Image (tube, grey):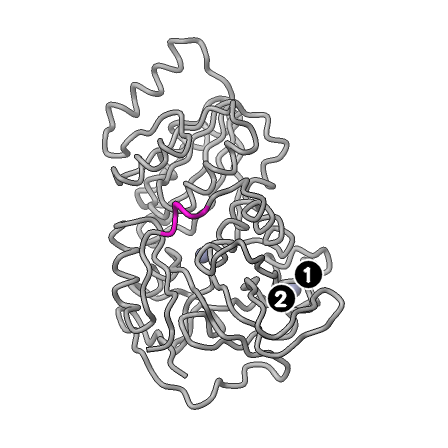
Amino acid sequence: MKAAFFHGPNDIKLEKMDDIRELDGDSKILRVLSCSVCSYDVRTFRTGSFKVKPPVILGHEICAEIVDDYNGPNCSVRSGSRVTIYPIVPCLKCWYCNSTNFNLCMNLREIGSTLNGGFAEYIRIPSRVFEIGGIVPVPDRVSNEEASLIEPLACCINGMNQIKPMNFESIIIIGDGPIGIMQLLLLKRYSPQIDVTVIGKIRHRLEVAKRLGANRVIAYTEKDQLDSYKELKEIEGSIMPNLIFVSNNNPSSLTLAFYLANKNGKVIIFSGIKNRKEYSFNGPFNIDPNIIHYSQISVYGSFSSNPDNLREAMKLVYDGEINLKNLVTDTFSLDNIDNALRTAESFKGLKSIINKFDF
Ligand SMILES: [Zn+2]
Ligand SMILES: [Zn+2]
């Protein structure tokens, strides 16, 4: 089979593998149908990741076809059926696993990061993922490409769950990428009345956000607009606790989030942040603790998802409550992986997806 191996920063090579290496004594082989490029893949491709030991195959937003029937307590799938895959392999021994918070497992391994992922013709999935309900069937109506976006949508659902009950009328999403757009769709589905502002850098993505229901969009580069947005709220006397999603990997978004947070507001850090060294405690990332104290700001984190979130995401898409079709903008064959990564990196469309593997 062919696979795109990450060997180190800026070095991904398409290679032939005679055999899929045995990673785990007990695992199943699936045929990959679609694998979407996550900003994590782009970041790892450019700078590596503390988690990744090359060579490894990246890609964790996967739709695949079952090769052999599987029948178990939390999963029953026939060969030829399509599924999406929970990309975390938990230890099942630690406190977090015992409380089914697999995303927080103390010994977690991740498909497409520490284990080989979906930028390949075939993928080997440890049986444990099947056993914890991490294999979610894809209904006929949902395309391969949409199915590969179920994983990031599940992550957004996990993020929403961290700040429930959601008694906010005013929400800001900093980030106009696929994650920010998915959060917008979830919020508007939750309550069309919620006032959502999307702040971003990319004009065409902000236009999509506006079209999909954002009450207003503001270009991040337009500092005046951001200031007047903050002032406007104050003048109108409409200031109220707000909720702010940091949904992109720019360190300055964190500073902006605290600048925009109202009293009793909540900031939820959704994205991994790039160039962490640049904003170590004495670097430019500088948050005044007094803002957190005197304005009573709460800070939340959200990482990955749980199998239940994947099921909920699939149901929302199947029921037509969330439409992911607008996010599928660029598709590539595996031999074009370089191009797919570059397209995602340059924010050209919204989602770059590998959906052809035979060439
Ligand atoms: Zn991802
Ligand atoms: Zn664990």
Tell me: residue 224, above or below residue 162: above
Q: Position of residue 97 (x, y in %)?
A: 68, 61
Q: Quadrant of residue 54?
A: bottom left
Q: Which mark is residue 90?
A: 2
The answer to whether the beta carbon of the residue marked 1 is less than 8 Å from any atom of ligand 2 is yes
Q: Is residue 121 magenta?
A: no
**Amino acid on which disc 2 is placed:** Pro
Q: Residue furthest front?
A: 140
Instruction: Kindly check if marks 2 and 1 are in contact, taking CB atoms under 8 A apart as contact.
Output: yes
Q: Quadrant of residue 98?
A: bottom right
**Is residue 185 visible from the viewing direction of this image?**
yes
The residue at the point 45 percent across, 47 percent down is: 324
Q: Which residue is mark 1?
A: 97
Question: In the rendered view, does 257 fall on the left or right side of 72?
Answer: left
The residue at the point 53 percent across, 75 percent down is: 30
Question: In the rendered view, does 118 fall on the left or right side of 225?
Answer: right
Q: Residue furthest right?
A: 73
Q: Which mark is residue 202?
A: none
Magenta segment: 324-328
Tell me: residue 297, above or below residue 22: above
The residue at the point 31 percent across, 40 percent down is: 205
Q: Residue furthest bottom?
A: 18
Give the class, few, some or many, for how many residues have Cα within 10 Å of label 2's Cα (few <14, many ≥20): many
The residue at the point 37 percent across, 40 percent down is: 175
Q: Position of residue 56 (x, y in %)?
A: 41, 76
Q: Position of residue 309 (x, y in %)?
A: 61, 50
The answer to whether the beta carbon of the residue marked 2 is less than 8 Å from any atom of ligand 2 is yes
**Is residue 294 visible from the viewing direction of this image?**
no
